[in-house]
Image (cartoon, grey):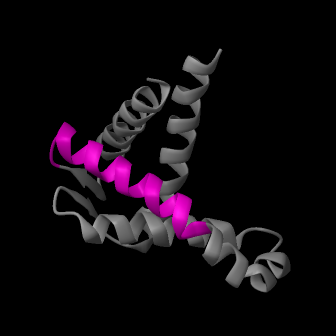
Amino acid sequence: MTLLLIWILNAVALLAVAYLLPGIAVASFGSAMWAALILGLVNMLVKPVLILLTLPITIVTLGLFLFVINALLFWFVGSMLTGFKVNGFWWAVIGAIVYSLISGFLTNLISK
């Protein structure tokens, strides 16, 4: 039950990001649900491998390269789905940051 609620909240966070940023578009709530699911799976499966592979550059940049990894994954999911569109790398950077903030805030609301 909690997993379903977190999935819905992540979709709502994605809709909020699309509303706030003109470079990111979500067609519908269903598209946001699919995008949240795919984004969660990509973050769970691909992100740890990328972090491990880019560990030297992440250490050299004092962790700032993690923003690039998050943006690339956000942009990748935007290019995979038809109902979720990210217009460029810098929109992906800003979108990933805003999505993380909103999603974290909403998830903390239900965990208390």
- Res. 38 in view: yes
Which of the pair 41/89 is nearer the observer?
41
Position of residue 107 relative to residue 20, above or below, is above
- Res. 95 in view: no
Give the x, y percent position of residue 87.
Answer: 29, 68
Q: Quadrant of the N terminus?
A: top left
Which of the pair 92/51 is nearer the observer?
51
- Magenta-tinted stretch: 27-47
Task: Identify which residue is drawn at 39% across, 68% down.
Answer: 75
In the displayed structure image, the side of residue 56 where residue 93 appears, left or right: left
Give the x, y percent position of residue 64.
Answer: 72, 69
Considering every residue shown, the one lying at the far front of the view is 1
The chief SS type of the magenta part is helix
Task: Identify which residue is drawn at 52% across, 60% down.
Answer: 43
Task: Identify which residue is drawn at 58% across, 36% down.
Answer: 104
Task: Identify which residue is drawn at 55% across, 18% down.
Answer: 110
Which of the pair 93/47 is nearer the observer?
47
In the displayed structure image, the side of residue 69 where residue 21 appears, left or right: left
In the displayed structure image, the side of residue 90 where residue 69 appears, left or right: right
